[in-house]
Image (cartoon, grey):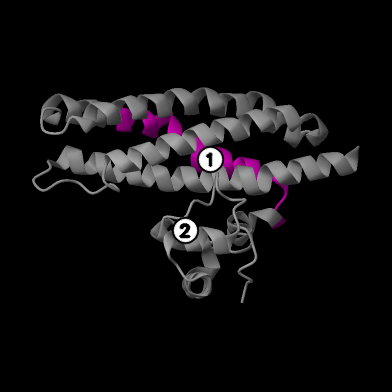
Amino acid sequence: MTSTSLSVGELVTAHPRAVAVLQRRQIDFCCGGARPLAEACAARGIDPQALLEEVHAEEVRWRADAVRWDERPLPELIDHILTRYHEPLITELPRILAMAHRVQQVHGDKDPRIAELVARVIALKDDLLPHMQKEELVLFPLIRGGRGMLAGGPITVMHVEHEEVGALLRQIRALTDDFTAPDGACGTWRALWQGLADLEADLHEHIHLENNILFPKALHDGAEAA
């Protein structure tokens, strides 16, 4: 069994199916990946050993689907990030924002927080689209070209922007009562809450792959090449 002395990010890197468990337990594994697992569990009132047992059970159920991205070549990981996360976000963010505007228009008088939610979704979209473009035009080509030694500056910027995205996601979760639609909510309202929940889950996985695997490996490989 994995040791509870690992950081949250190390746990997810070694055991990809831990993502599902941490999401259920609302433990941050992307921007909070450097936090010791025992400390993160204590903050949520969870026994870390029990959580590890839950991770093991999850892996047994899904072993065939688990991919150790820390063991795959960096270009392959970049391709996965682009196709699994970047490309869907380009269409998903405008779709979610359109639903948010619709819910505000029809139901904004029922809950004043909907206007705040729309503002956060706009901020998320405005942060993520240029962020991904910088990765695709600057950072990822450096890494693909084996020039990780030049990536320190861009990676620092990406870390800061990931923290900003993480803060917006926490605000969105709070404004939606943990994505729990109110009684009597219409189909669009419920679809918006589900879309935001799915978006949060994908972004947590996305940021984890970059913060805890892609960036450290790129810097390590770049330093060795130098």
> Quarter-wise, where is residue 31 in the image?
top right
State left or right for residue 157 relative to residue 26: right
Q: Kindly report the distance in space between the C-alpha atoms of the residues bearing marks 1 and 2.
A: 34 Å
Q: Is residue 95 magenta?
A: yes
The vertical placement of 172 against 8, above or below, is above
Residue in front for this viewpoint, 31 or 187? 31
* Dot 2 crowding, Cα within 10 Å, few <14, some 14–19, many 20+: few
In the picture, which quadrant includes the C terminus? top right
Residue 126 lies, in percent from the top left, at 44, 22
Q: Is residue 130 magenta?
A: no
Q: Which mark is residue 59?
A: none
In the picture, which quadrant includes the N terminus? bottom right
Judge whether residue 184 can be spotted in this image. yes
The vertical placement of 47 against 105, above or below, is below
Q: Which mark is residue 43?
A: 2
Magenta stretch secondary structure, dominant: helix
**Label 1 vs 2, first from the N-terminus:** 2
| Badge 1 element | helix
Residue 112 lies, in percent from the top left, at 18, 29
* Dot 1 crowding, Cα within 10 Å, few <14, some 14–19, many 20+: few
Q: Magenta stretch?
A: 71-98
Q: Which mark is residue 83?
A: 1
Q: Residue at x 28, y 38 (%)?
A: 175
| Badge 2 element | helix
